[in-house]
C-alpha cells in the first residue's frame, strides 16, 4: 500500500499568516489522484482539494493545492480562526486508498 | 443537494455483529461508488471498503476482509455495512463517503455521512 507521510505534525500560526502543509507519498500516486480534507472536532471530514490542485465546491480560494508524483502541498494563504482543524491528505489512485496521519493547524 | 445520512450510534458486546446504514439523496444513487472509512478515538482516518451501488461489486482493504460486508439497496438508495466478530478495538466512528471527481471507482470523497459511533464493550 502507498504510505503518505504528512509534515509537520502540528502547525501553530497567527491569523493572516500563511500555512504550508506537506504530504509525501512512498511511491508515485499517479496523475493527481491526491486529495486534501479538513476535519474539525466532532465533525466529519470535508473535501477541500481533489486531483492535487482542484478546489471542491464552496471552498474559499485561500486554500490551494499543488504537487505531483510523490510530493504534494496544501497552502492556506491567509489563516482565519475557523481554519483551526486537522488536515489529511489522501491518495485515491490505488487500492487500498490511504490517508496521511494528519497535520493539526492551531491558530494562536 | 447531495445528502448522506447514517444510522445512529450502537453499543455491542464483543463477538456480536452490527449493521450500519448510509442513506443517500439528492443525486443518482447508482452513478457513484460509496466508501467506508473508520476513525478510532483520537486517531486518523482509515479506508475500509468500497461498493458500487449499481451491481453491488465490492472491494475490501485486506485488514477488513472476512469481517466487513457491504450491501446496497437501490430501491431505497441505501448502502449497508455489517461488521462481524466485533472486538473492543473496533470501537470507532464509522463514516460512509461518496466517491467523485475521478475515474471509475477512483474518486475523491466529496460527500460524507455524519458518522456512526460503534462502541464495543462487555
Image: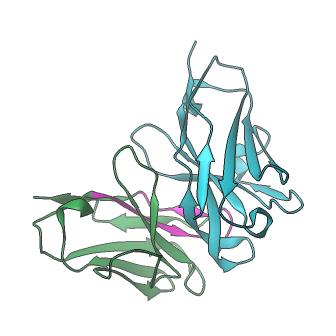
Chain colours: A green, B cyan
* Count of numbered circles in the view: 0
Q: Left of A17 or right of it: where is B3?
A: right
| x and y percentages locating residue A35 in the rendered image | 49, 73
Inspect the magenta stretch and tell me whether residue A91 lies in it.
yes
Give the residue at x 73% y 71%: B105
Q: In which quadrant of the rendered image does the N terminus of chain B lie?
A: bottom right
Give the residue at x 64% y 16%: B13
Give the residue at x 19% y 71%: A79
Give the residue at x 64% y 62%: B98
Q: Left of A4 or right of it: where is A12?
A: left
Q: Nearer the viewer, residue A66 or A26?
A: A66
| x and y percentages locating residue A73 in the rendered image | 36, 79
Q: Nearer the viewer, residue B90 or A7?
A: B90
Q: Is residue B57 above or below residue B48?
A: below
Q: Which quadrant holds residue B74? A: bottom right
Which residue occupies the extreme right position in the image? Answer: B55
| x and y percentages locating residue A31 in the rendered image | 59, 87
Q: Which quadrant holds residue A84? A: bottom left
Inspect the magenta stretch and tell me whether residue B35 lies in it.
no
Q: Which quadrant holds residue A53? A: bottom left
Q: Which residues are magenta?
A: A85-101
Q: In which quadrant of the rendered image does the C terminus of chain B lie?
A: top right
Q: Left of B97 or right of it: where is A70?
A: left
| x and y percentages locating residue A12 in the rendered image | 15, 61
Amino acid at each position: 500500500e502507498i504510505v503518505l507521510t504528512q509534515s509537520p505534525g502540528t502547525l501553530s500560526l497567527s491569523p493572516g499568516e500563511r500555512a504550508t502543509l506537506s504530504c509525501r507519498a512512498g511511491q508515485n500516486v499517479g496523475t493527481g489522484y491526491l486529495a486534501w480534507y479538513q476535519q474539525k472536532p466532532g465533525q466529519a471530514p470535508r473535501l477541500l482539494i481533489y486531483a492535487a490542485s482542484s478546489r471542491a465546491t464552496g471552498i474559499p480560494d485561500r486554500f490551494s493545492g499543488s504537487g505531483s508524483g510523490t510530493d504534494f502541498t496544501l497552502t492556506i494563504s491567509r489563516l482565519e480562526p475557523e481554519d483551526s482543524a486537522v488536515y489529511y491528505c489522501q491518495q485515491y489512485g490505488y487500492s487500498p486508498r490511504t490517508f496521511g496521519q494528519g497535520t493539526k493547524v492551531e491558530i494562536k | 443537494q447531495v445528502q448522506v445520512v447514517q444510522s445512529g450510534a450502537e453499543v455491542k458486546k464483543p463477538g456480536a455483529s452490527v449493521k450500519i446504514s448510509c442513506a443517500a439523496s439528492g443525486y443518482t444513487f447508482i452513478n457513484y461508488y460509496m466508501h467506508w472509512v473508520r476513525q478510532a478515538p483520537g486517531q486518523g482516518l482509515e479506508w475500509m471498503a468500497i461498493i458500487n451501488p449499481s451491481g453491488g461489486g465490492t472491494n475490501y482493504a485486506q485488514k477488513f476482509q472476512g469481517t466487513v460486508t457491504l450491501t446496497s439497496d437501490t430501491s431505497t438508495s441505501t448502502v449497508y455495512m455489517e461488521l462481524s466478530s466485533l472486538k473492543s478495538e473496533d470501537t470507532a466512528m464509522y463514516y460512509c463517503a461518496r466517491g467523485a471527481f475521478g475515474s471509475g471507482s477512483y474518486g475523491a470523497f466529496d460527500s460524507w455521512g455524519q458518522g456512526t459511533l460503534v462502541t464495543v464493550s462487555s
